Image (spheres, rainbow, N blue to C red):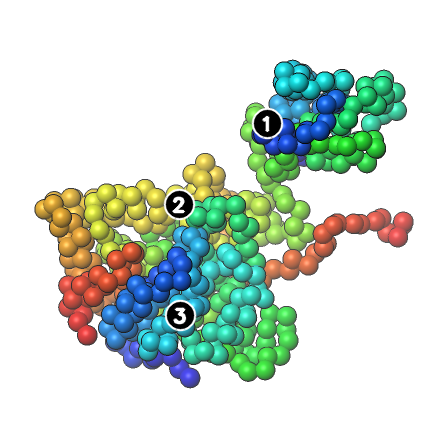
Amino acid sequence: MIRSITIQKSMDKLERLLEGSARIFIIGCGTCVTLTHTGGETETAAMADNLTKNGKLVTGRIVTPVACDNLSSEMLVSCQGQIRQADCLLVMTCAFGVQTIARQLMKLTIPALDTIFIGKETSVGRFDEICIQCGDCFIGETGGICPVTACHKGLVNGPCGGTNKGKCEIDMNKDCAWTSIYKRLMDLEHLDSMRKFHPPRSYHTEPKPGKWSLASIA
Amino acid sequence: MVSSFKEALESGKFVVTCEVAPPKGTNLNTMKHHIELLKDRVDAMNVTDHQSSVMRFPSLGGALLVKEMGGEPILQMTCRDRNRLAMQADLLFASSRGISNVLCLTGDAIVLGDHKQAKAVFDLDSSQLLYTVRQLEKGKDLGGNDLDGVPSFCAGAIVTPEADPLEPQLIKFEKKIEAGADFIQTQAVYDLDRFKSFMTYARQFQVKILAGIILLTSAPMARFMNNNIAGVNVPQDLIDELASAPKGKALAKGIEIAGRMIRRIQDENMCDGVHIMAIGKEEKTVDIMAAAGLER
């Protein structure tokens, strides 16, 4: 399943963002941020304690089931008063959740987390970035491993000189994508696809901001 | 106009290139001193491009300085800091000012340098930059538009003969040749028997190969390179030899080792020449050449 991977902003940054807001309503999410322990029940409770200790008034908190879906009217009704009393919403979800909430509630919305990538849980408690939505999928020639994402430099013609015993020059805990691709293609007996030269890529796929409609609607 | 470096490569002589590093700042005195010292002793000098992702005076400016001082520059260009518009523009400018050798590199990662928060580019990779050079020479830019005035380059790239695993590196090496590399300067080699077996493979391609020689300055420096520089492998016997040097003589020992290696490469006709990298001690290039019997 696709997961938004988040880390909490530093308290210094949060203090700056919350400057001038005395009353705060906290929103967490029961999906990705619960899995990554950044915005579930425990973390929103800890944030409420922390803010209270720092002199803020927490008007209430809620953990929505899926913050990137629109908030249900039942939920909005149940928290209506607490939200109205607050100067701002401190949202402990990924940026999808923050933006969905910001669109729905006309209230100053402060993200408590940074979304670092959209990834996959590859083993218990470990998350890997596997697609950056580049709009020009390469993995048909790389054994299903994406070099645009998994190579730090996004190289599509093979490894750089920084490849080191199967690891990347930036971090020995990160695999060299091209060593992984090489091994996979060897196993698949398709190493020849690594020999194909890719001319300069087109970055003119779907220009930012992405917008797309079903043909039947357009 | 054919570059004098290209002529040297094609002459069949043992070619020697070295490295000069632009300064951090506007004081060009040390760089000028190195250029003056080396320009008539080597066939060409590489001007590094924000080496190790450390911001410096640009390689293009440094290459121009080499040219103005009567030397033969090899413009190093990495793909880390510029997109394809900027890279093509710099190639056109270089050519217009008589800089006719370019070394196409991917570039170290930003996070290894001194501007860790900067945005990396990598719009092109090293093989695509070579392809770009060859496209410009055909009178077309990467957008397919006609050029008014066409550049010409002797273009090169690098290979790491001691990469682990090696085969992916060799596949990339072959792509660089396919994309149009005239010459290859290798990452530092120390185990010459292993380098010989690399050359047995590399000889099948129409490309000139210059073996990379990095000056070892001490045993700790050699160990540091083994631990921190990808694809560099200083054998234990060389580290022991450096460690056995009397106090204050490790650098002299390193120069002796580099000279000995170059001499063997030349004597055994292993490849087409050497690329000497006396990182931070560029003036010692002269002593290394003397130790190798390459006085010019």
Say whether disc 2 or disc 1 marks the residue closer to the N-terminus.
Answer: 1
Residue A100 in picture, x, y percent from top left: 78, 34
Side of A118 where A154 appears, left or right: left
**Chain letter, disc 3 residue:** B
- Look at the image and tell me whether residue B109 can be seen: yes
What residue appears at the point 71 percent right and 29 percent down from the top-left corner?
A20
Towards the viewer: A175 or B74: B74
Residue B63: mark in rendering: 3
Q: Nearer the viewer, residue B279 or A177?
A: B279
Q: Which of the two discs, 3 and 1, sits closer to the camera?
A: 1
Q: Looking at the image, can residue B157 be seen?
A: no
Q: What's the mark number on residue A2?
A: none
Q: Are marks 2 and 3 on the same chain?
A: no
Say if labels 3 and 1 share a chain: no
Q: Secondary structure at mark 1?
A: helix
Residue bearing mark 1: A11
Q: Which mark is residue A164?
A: 2
Q: Nearer the viewer, mark 2 or mark 3?
A: 3
- How far across and how far down the image is residue A196, in percent? 53, 60
> Which chain contains the residue that carries disc 1?
A
Q: Position of residue B143 (x, y in %)?
A: 63, 70
Q: Secondary structure at mark 2?
A: loop
